[in-house]
Amino acid sequence: MKDIFGDLLYFLNLCGIYQKDLKSDEFNDFISSEVFSVEQDSKVQISQLVNPFTTIDENLKESYFSPVEYGKYVFNDEKRDFSKEIQNLISEFKKEISALPMNFNIVERLVKKYFSFVSFSKPFIQSISAYQYSKLQALLSSSLRLYCQNYGKNLGSLQNAEQIFTLVGGDISGIQRFISNVSSRGALRSYRGRSFFIEFVQEVIVDKILEDIGLSRLHVYFIGGGHFYLIVPNISEIEQKMNKSIEEINRWFIEKRLDLSVIIDYTHFSLNEVKHDIQKVFSELSKKLRLKKYRSLSIENMPMVFEPLTLSNLEVCKVCGRKVEKVYKLRNDDIEAFACEICKMQYEFGKEIMESENVYIIESAQGNFEILGKRFDFVQNFEGNRKGYKIRKINEILEKEENIIPLEIVSYAYSQDLSELSVDEPSKKYASFQADVDNLGNLFRNKLGNTSLAQSSMISGMLTYFFKQQIYKILAGKKITVIYAGGDDLFLLGNWRDVLEFSKQMYEEFRNFVQNENITFSAGYVLFSDKESIKMIKEISENAESRAKDNGKDSIAFSNPIYKGMVISGQRKHVSKGLALKWREYQEIFDFFEDTEEIADYVDRSLIRKMLNISYENTPLAHAYFSYLYARETEERDKELIGLIMEKYKNLDEKSLEKVNARMNLIAQLLDLTVRR
Ligand SMILES: [Zn+2]
């Protein structure tokens, strides 16, 4: 069989970047001319990449991405001469590819590394990266080749509407419940372990299916956030093997009695749909997956689900609450065993993932972790040719990594220990931040409705890039621990002040990155103390995020400032739900907070308490009251702070008074945290 890395290099070959004999064949030529409208003898060059978010909506000014390696910080740029940077990328690529073994995984990583932020010149679409084009070319021509070979067809006899391809979709369901189902014992670590488990298990599932049907990772179209899509040739033998594989995967989940299930289904599609109507294929598949989800507990699975409950002498896992046959200690110094096998694994995962010396997760017969019948170990290094995954330094591509799959995981953690995040913090308060992109389904269904596979793939790829790569620049140095960063969402905990600043910077970076006002995200910010359980924090964070969505999206919402047990009187209604602000309003509030914060360090704490009380009362006399305080005050700094606050209360009607009071309430709460000693 043909070497599939040759398919990947087909377009780069047209550019004269890689000129060795690639054994390009008629299938490659067919796909490039039929799907991408590129003639064989075209002179193609590397060109500047148009920011794909700026081409979604009409009348937007097109922006360009800076040509950089994958993993570097990307900024928007003018259209300009960047031949020097491009020459650099090309020569680095050539240098690396000539020193490494030619194998699909390695070549794919190299093309991704150097050609993710450049495009090909016309007739290629300028907002699709050279990497994305190369990958789809390889994926489609390889599938087409297998299809024709299997059915003894030739290209001339193919119909445009012939169902050549199969789109396989997978959905891990129950993720939220699974992740947050941890008690306080080892919670942070378990929580992160569980989030990582989801990201890892989706890779293991995909690799199992591909192994069972005898295809390579080339056929992975998308993977992330508990979802995956594969594109494979529509061959009945493959379908049979796949069905068997899916059955085995389901059985593993049931036998382990995880609160998770995996729904996998597929649909067929044609070249026509690749070109014009790929979203329809995706919608069809989502519908099938939804239906299947509701039928997932079939009668025959029932006995397996309930069977263990009928056994006597079961122990209760104190982490997740399930009844199990055996419990284990989480740590050596634990007095008693209390965690089930799965919870123990999640806990260990959470620990291992954060150890900076763990670079790989390698398949190994004696491995500590078992998933789908395979055992794995976290290791720093390995000898020989091993199968596995790379979780750090993924841009460093080594000769021995022929069977290593890079996993993009945001493993940023200031500390393994929650209490270290607030160590210099007088208030000992923390904050959580949960965010996700608004209207994502709508974006793909409507705005990208009639576009090609390449365009929608580009958009999801770039959103992932923001949440998994750009984010590092905003996190740098902050006392924050990322629990989860997926393709379009994020959940983190940290020192309340650092998370506050992070929120503002993330908004600004996101705006800079997409350069399109219609693409927004919403977030929840929740203050908490170390007495609250992670489960509770997650719930309140989700609630805050949904209030941000209710605020017309493009917003941030804060947790309810009224503490448990406190009576919410009539006057306090304006703050009872917690404040929701448009991001632009938040920017102003943040700036105001920073101005007052500098002064607050020197003022009397009782002044902050007065500010807090006035904002709670929601009285029309607020301005008068502050004027009175101002007149009586003798301390310079106190006077300055009161002056800044009075500015905000000037000339307010009833409605804006309520708004200002709600905002002052938030600021007073935050100032109160900074002055606690
Ligand atoms: Zn458990």
Image: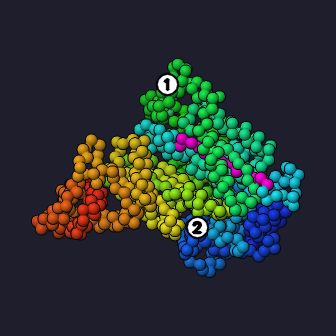
Is 543 rendered above or below residue 310?
below
Q: What element carries label 2?
A: loop
Can you tell which mark lies on residue 56?
2
The picture places residue 550, in percent across and down from the top left corner, at: 42, 54
Residue span colored magenta: 162-175
The picture places residue 277, in percent across and down from the top left corner, at: 68, 59
Is 583 rendered above or below residue 171?
below
Residue 12 in view (yes/no): yes
Magenta-colored stretch includes residue 173? yes
Q: Mark 1 points at which residue?
A: 315
Magenta-colored stretch includes residue 512? no
Q: How many labels does the image show?
A: 2
Q: Are marks 2 and 1 in contact (CB under 8 Å)?
A: no
Can you tell which mark lies on residue 675?
none
Q: Distance between the residues labelled 2 and 1?
A: 55 Å
The colouring scheme, among rainbow, by chain, secondary structure or one colour, is rainbow
The picture places residue 448, in percent across and down from the top left corner, at: 61, 62
- Mark 1 residue type: Glu
Nearest the camera: 167 or 216? 167
- Mark 2 residue type: Ile
Residue at 45 percent of width and 63 percent of height = 507
Give the left or right position of residue 512, taking residue 615 as reference. right
Ligand 1 within 8 Å of disc 1? The answer is no
Main SS, magenta region, reads: strand
Residue at 87 percent of width and 58 percent of height = 157
Q: What element carries label 1?
A: strand
Residue at 77 percent of width and 53 percent of height = 163
